[in-house]
Amino acid sequence: MQQQEASSRPRSSAYLNALTQEIEKKLQRALASSSQRRNLLQQLFADIALEVDDRAKDIILSREEDAISPAEYGINGRLCFYDVLADYYVQEPESGKPILDLIVQLWSQSFASQNFALLFHKWLFEVQLDNADVLLRYSSALVQGATNVFWIDIQSNTRRFQSLFQYLLEEVALEPTRLNKIPVQQAQRDLYLLLSRFIFFYNSVEKLESFFKQCPAFPNAFLIGGPADILVIELADQLQKLKVEPVLLHYLSQIKVLQGHGTENGHKYEVEDQFV
């Protein structure tokens, strides 16, 4: 009976289900072995960040009815395993639940938040969750994990995780129905601060105007000013931390885009004065 069910299942779903089982096994091993835990979580991160090879792509992007559409995936022709798995866990939430439960048990470990961010960033915003405490916990883990993977890109001057950034910017921050799923005061603020730091690196400056318009009001003494002020403050701090010269030059080359975007407190001039 199981053999018949497997043979009738579309190839793409069967392949992603098999990948899910391998991920679950690796997480179970990490949970069982404290000495190997970090290595196993790091290996899992490396596995799901890999670019999909041609053989796997033929299966995943097959023409079957519920297969993944090639048009929906890939940035600059690059398609990584986390891209397709993230969407699979939206289409089949029950398939991802065992993995999510294991990651939660490994919450405090290195690479747990990175794996969560890559695998469940779409699930968090596209699957119905009603528990406010759970939403806050997951959204905090998402921001932490996304921050870590974006810094990996910066340190290597690559953009392997650009599709994650673009989803958080274009499909969440600029889409109020999704953005409003997470708590305003902490989670939404942290997401906007994160995107402000990396929007130049991931070549999304054409979205600045929309980004400023959609940014919610954050009544906080530490964030006085409008959205442009918040971005410039975060940008100035980011520039101080950059150690990779080509990345720093890339940021500096785009600062001129801020001209014409008035800030309520004149912060843009502070950034320009420091680095011109």
Image (cartoon, helix red, strand yellow):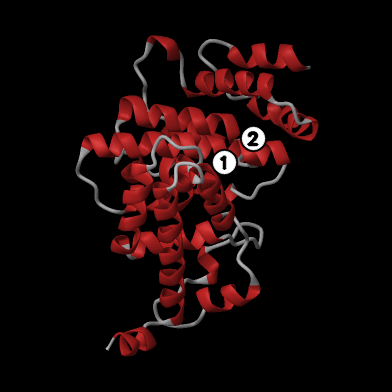
Residue assigned mark 1: 149
Q: Specify the amino acid type for callout 2.
A: Phe
Label 1 neighbour load within 10 Å: few <14, some 14-19, many 20+ = many
User: Closer to the camera: disc 2 or disc 1?
Assistant: 1
Q: Is residue 268 visible?
A: yes
Q: Position of residue 269 (x, y in %)?
A: 66, 13
Q: Is residue 207 visible?
A: no
For the point 31% across and 45% down, the residue is: 177
- The kind of residue on which mark 1 rests is Val
Say which quadrant the C terminus sits in: top right
For residue 197, side relative to residue 156 (left or right): left
Q: Is residue 103 left or right of residue 150?
A: left
Is residue 37 rendered to the left or right of residue 93? right
Residue at image x 60%, y 41%?
A: 204
Q: Nearer the viewer, residue 36 or 204?
A: 36
| Residue 101 placement (x, y as % from top left) | 31, 50
Q: Where is mark 2, residue-wise?
A: 200
